[in-house]
Image (tube, helix red, strand yellow):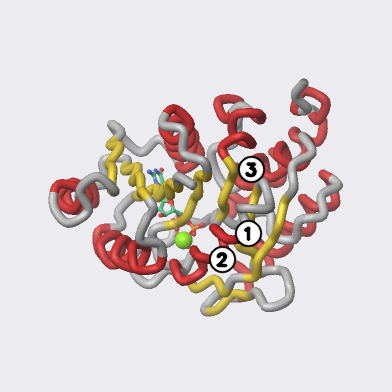
Amino acid sequence: MKKLIIVATYNERDNIGPLLAEIYVNAPDVHVLVIDDSSPDKTYEIVQELSDTIYKDKLFLLKRAGKLGLGTAYVAGFNWGIERKYDVIMEMDADFSHNPKYLPQFFEEIKTNDLVIGSRYVPGGGVVNWGLGRKIMSQGGSIYSRFILGLKTRDLTGGFKCYRREVLEKINVNELKSNGYSFQIEGTYKTFLNGFKIKEIPIIFEDRRVGQSKMSGGIFLEALLMVLKLSLHKKEFIKK
Ligand SMILES: Nc1nc2c(ncn2[C@@H]2O[C@H](COP(=O)(O)OP(=O)(O)OP(=O)(O)O)[C@@H](O)[C@H]2O)c(=O)[nH]1
Ligand SMILES: [Mg+2]
């Protein structure tokens, strides 16, 4: 099973090195694609250096011209992975909110599922170091989306996810419209609509270790509207 992990970065220079080390300890045979949007802190320089040296042939860098958003970063990464015929393609954040210790569980579960989601809202899962506001936004966003879209999935906004390539091919990643918070909701919704098997595994999500948070009320509101839009276009998302 050829495995790819996509890590999008924007100003993660203090996180990326230690994160890659932990990824390869937990999953020695994975390939990692870092998509960096020309981070002002030059995260990409560290990645380039590591991919030329200790992680040769298993670490790849896609550097984009500027900050184009997390959604388009993942779409670019999905296409990169599909072209190279990886069997499974994962997404994870660079800030240690997604602990690499869970990787073996993802790769075990993906053998019998089409999408595996690291979930904060199933028994055994949770969040540490988040303020009340952030908790309400995240869990509220998931409950709202679940209700509007008729999904069973409990954690719809998290980005610690492992797809089988076939799913990404079928839903056509180039048609993923969201670029912010709702990108994760859209991916899971389209996977569900096309009859794929989704499994949530519990994860403890930790607030970013270092660096600046990018979350805001505007992003949240945009996501609520996007969910309504998705529900209205449901029929178009079911592929022949
Ligand atoms: N390439 C790229 N990566 C991004 C962009 N925005 C965010 N990221 C990365 O995407 C991942 C998730 O972003 P975060 O800023 O951690 O978002 P969050 O977890 O919702 O919020 P905080 O952790 O509170 O900041 C991180 O690895 C970021 O560095 C972007 O525009 N381009
Ligand atoms: Mg984060």
The amino acid type found where label 1 is placed reads Glu
**Secondary structure at numbered mark 1:** helix
Q: CA distance from mark 2 to mark 3?
A: 33 Å
Q: Is residue 179 above or below residue 175?
A: below
**Secondary structure at numbered mark 3:** helix
Mark drawn on residue 109 = 1
Q: Residues within 10 Å of mark 1 (few under 14, many from 20)?
A: some
The amino acid type found where label 2 is placed reads Gln
Q: Work out whether mark 1 precedes mark 3 in sequence or the reverse, and give the earlier one.
A: 1
Q: CA distance from mark 1 to mark 2?
A: 6 Å
Which residue is denoted by mark 2 in the rendering? Answer: 105
Q: Residue at x 78, y 59 (%)?
A: 143
Q: Is residue 11 above or below residue 206?
A: above
Q: Residues within 10 Å of mark 2 (few under 14, many from 20)?
A: few
Q: Is residue 193 above or below residue 43?
A: above
The amino acid type found where label 3 is placed reads Glu
Q: In the displayed structure, does residue 103 sit left or right of residue 171?
A: left
Q: Are marks 1 and 2 in contact (CB under 8 Å)?
A: yes
Which residue is denoted by mark 3 in the rendering? Answer: 222
Q: Residue at x 75, y 27 (%)?
A: 237
Q: Work out whether mark 2 precedes mark 3 in sequence or the reverse, and give the earlier one.
A: 2
Tell me if the residue at label 1 has its CB under 8 Å from ligand 1: no
Q: Residue at x 32, y 40 (%)?
A: 37
Point out residue 239 in the picture as x, y percentages from the top left corner. Answer: 75, 24
Point out residue 115 in the picture as x, y percentages from the top left corner. Answer: 65, 49
Mark yes or no: residue 154 visible.
yes
Point out residue 202 in the picture as x, y percentages from the top left corner. Answer: 65, 70
